[in-house]
C-alpha cells in the first residue's frame, strides 16, 4: 500500500510539471467555428507510417493539444485530427488512461473532443481500438491534476500484445462527417451514430479539437485509483 501511495505521489508531481509546460489552446472557442475549421482540413499522410509519433513516459503524464494545427488523417471512420505516440518500452503490464479535458471556462458547453484510442503494431496495423461506449465522464477529483473530462482506460501487457504506437482521434460521424460509403474495417461509424441517437440532446457537444492528457502507470496502481471512474455516468446519460 505504501508503494502504491509513493507511486501516486510521483505521478501527481509529474502532473504538476506537465501543467506548467502545457501549451495554450489554439482553436476557436465556438463549436461552429471549430467545425468550420475542421471542414477545411486535408489529410497529412497516405498511411500511418507517415505520422509523427511523440514520446510517452514509462510512468507519469503527457499532455497534448489537438487543434487546427494538428495533423489530420482519413481513418477508416473518416477524417479526424489526431495525436500519435510511441508506447514506452516496458517489460511488465501497465495501464494507459487517455482523458480529453473540458475547456476550463465553460465546462465543455462549447464542445469536447470525444477520444477513441487505436493501438498499432510495428507494421502500423491496428491491433486494438476503443469506442465511444468505453468513455466515462470523469470528475475533476478522480485523478491528480484536478480537471474534468471524458476518459478511456486500457491495460497493456507487453508479453501478450504487439502494440507499439498509440493514436488518439475521434469518429468523423460524431462531427457530422461520416464517410460517404461503407469502408472495410470501419468499426466506429455505426456505433458513433447509434451513440448520438441514444443520447440525443443530452450528449455533450462534440468538437474536433481539445486538450488530451495521457497517464501511464503500473496496471495495479491505476486500477486501484479508478473505482470512482468506473461508477461514473456515461457522458450524456444524466
Image (tube, grey):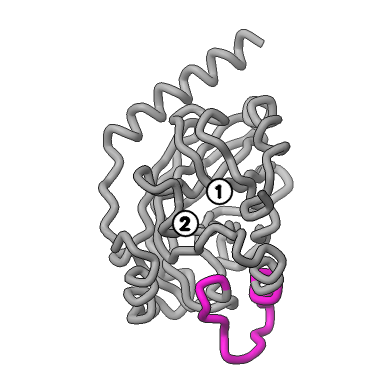
Mark linked to residue 112: 2
Query: Where residue 9 sits in the image (x, y, percent)?
Result: 49, 17
Please indicate, yes or no, whether residue 175 appears anywhere in the rendered image: yes
Q: Residue at x 47, y 56 (%)?
A: 112
Crowdedness near tag 1: few (<14), some (14–19) or many (≥20) residues, C-alpha within 10 Å: many
Q: Main secondary structure of the magenta part?
A: loop
Q: In which quarter of the image is residue 93?
A: top right
Residue lying at 64% horizontally and 46% vertically, measured from the top left: 136
Residue 74 vs residue 36: left or right? right
Q: Please provide percent x and percent y for residue 151.
A: 58, 46
| Callout 1 touching callout 2 (CB < 8 Å) | yes
Q: Position of residue 36 (x, y in %)?
A: 34, 77
Question: Is residue 131 magenta-colored?
Answer: no
Relative to 194, 81 lies left or right: left
Q: Residue at x 27, y 37 (%)?
A: 21
Q: Position of residue 19 (x, y in %)?
A: 33, 34
177 magenta-colored:
yes
Tag of residue 150? 1
Q: What stretch is highlighted in magenta?
A: 174-192
Amino acid at each position: 500500500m505504501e508503494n502504491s501511495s509513493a507511486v501516486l505521489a510521483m505521478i501527481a508531481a509529474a502532473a504538476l510539471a506537465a501543467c506548467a509546460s502545457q501549451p495554450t489552446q489554439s482553436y476557436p472557442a465556438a463549436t461552429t467555428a471549430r467545425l468550420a475549421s475542421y471542414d477545411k482540413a486535408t489529410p497529412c499522410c497516405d498511411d500511418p507510417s507517415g505520422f509523427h509519433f511523440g514520446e510517452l513516459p514509462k510512468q507519469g503524464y503527457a499532455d497534448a493539444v489537438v487543434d487546427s494545427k494538428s495533423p489530420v488523417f482519413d481513418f477508416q471512420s473518416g477524417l479526424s485530427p489526431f495525436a500519435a505516440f510511441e508506447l514506452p518500452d516496458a517489460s511488465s503490464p501497465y495501464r494507459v488512461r487517455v482523458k480529453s479535458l473540458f475547456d476550463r471556462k465553460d465546462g465543455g458547453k462549447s464542445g469536447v473532443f470525444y477520444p477513441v484510442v487505436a493501438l498499432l503494431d510495428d507494421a502500423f496495423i491496428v491491433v486494438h481500438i476503443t469506442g465511444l461506449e468505453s468513455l466515462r465522464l470523469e470528475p475533476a477529483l478522480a485523478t491528480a491534476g484536478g480537471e474534468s473530462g471524458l476518459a478511456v482506460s486500457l491495460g497493456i501487457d507487453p508479453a501478450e500484445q504487439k502494440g507499439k504506437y498509440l493514436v488518439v482521434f475521434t469518429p468523423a460521424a460524431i462531427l457530422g462527417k461520416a464517410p460517404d460509403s461503407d469502408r472495410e474495417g470501419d468499426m466506429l461509424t455505426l456505433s458513433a451514430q447509434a451513440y448520438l441517437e441514444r443520447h440525443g440532446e443530452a450528449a455533450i457537444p462534440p468538437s474536433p479539437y481539445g486538450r488530451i492528457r495521457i497517464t501511464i502507470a503500473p496496471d495495479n496502481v491505476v486500477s486501484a485509483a479508478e473505482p470512482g471512474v468506473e461508477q461514473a455516468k456515461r457522458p450524456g446519460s444524466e
